[in-house]
Image (cartoon, grey):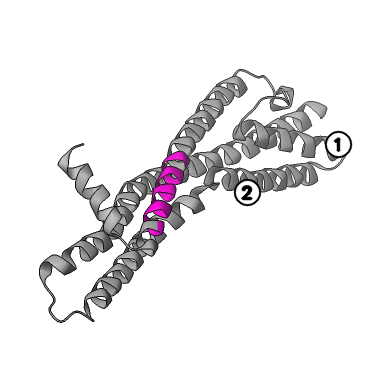
Amino acid sequence: MTPVFGSVFTAFGDSNLAGQLIVILLIAFSVLAWTVMLGKYHELKKMRDLNTRYERYLAQLGTIRAAQKDYPGAYASLTREAIEAWGRTEGGSSELRIGMVENAIQRSVGECVMGYEGKMVWLASIVTGAPFFGLLGTVWGVMDAFGAIATEQTATIQMLAPGVSGALLTTVAGLLVAIPSVFGYNYLLSQTKIMVTELENFASILADRFELEERAGEGRAR
């Protein structure tokens, strides 16, 4: 066992019960944070790939209403909702149909944005809470260490050091959880914002395409 890990286990053994429980809790937070970060990264990557493929697919279609309804992805969901809204208003005026399509697209955008931002609250909570849990364990441990030597006639640094080092372990653990989590959170948040902007742009293009097709249909009917 390396000296570093040996000192860590020694400090853990010198911690009080509350400190040990907090360290174990922070380890669980770390596992959760990495699970969320890696899972969210792959989820966003998959969503972006699906959206890119669907955008290429739509570009090849003569009319937007010919799009397949079982295609996966956020862009496909917007298109599907728009087509269904279009079908429900068949026979109505152009203004009514276009308005219903735009409303359906906006509702679908809101639902997709919630999907993009899903699980981020867990990561934000860990980023915020982990250092405070570490600080709580340190303060608690230091109080116990000073309390233990308060009844002694003479207090030495050798008597105080084990309790203090065990108490400081919780701060180290809290920082080791929070530091990678905050970098991961900021990266994923930036990617989410970019994808939300791309989604809103696609929604605008989709609404424009429906309107253009409706106007073209009106022109042919005349």
193 vs 139, nearest the viewer: 139
Which residue is at 56% across, 26% downward? 50
Q: Main secondary structure of the magenta part?
A: helix
Secondary structure under the numbered disc 2 in the rendered image: helix
Q: Is mark 1 in CB contact (under 8 Å) with mark 2?
A: no
Secondary structure under the numbered disc 1 in the rendered image: loop
Q: Upstream in the sequence, badge 1 or badge 2?
A: 1
Badge 2 is on which residue?
110
**Residue found at the very far right of the displayed protein:** 91
- On residue 90, the disc is 1
Query: As shown in the figure, which amino acid type bears the numbered disc 2?
Result: Gly
Question: Which of the 4 image quarters holds residue 22?
Answer: bottom left
**Against 27, is 168 above or below?**
below
* Range of magenta residues: 21-35
40 vs 26, nearest the viewer: 26
Which residue is at 45% across, 57% downward? 125
Which residue is at 49% across, 44% downward? 197
Q: Position of residue 159 (x, y in %)?
A: 16, 68
Q: Quadrant of the N terminus?
A: top left
Query: As shown in the figure, which amino acid type bears the numbered disc 1?
Result: Glu
114 vs 81, nearest the viewer: 114
Q: Quadrant of the C terminus?
A: top right
Q: Position of residue 93 (x, y in %)?
A: 83, 43
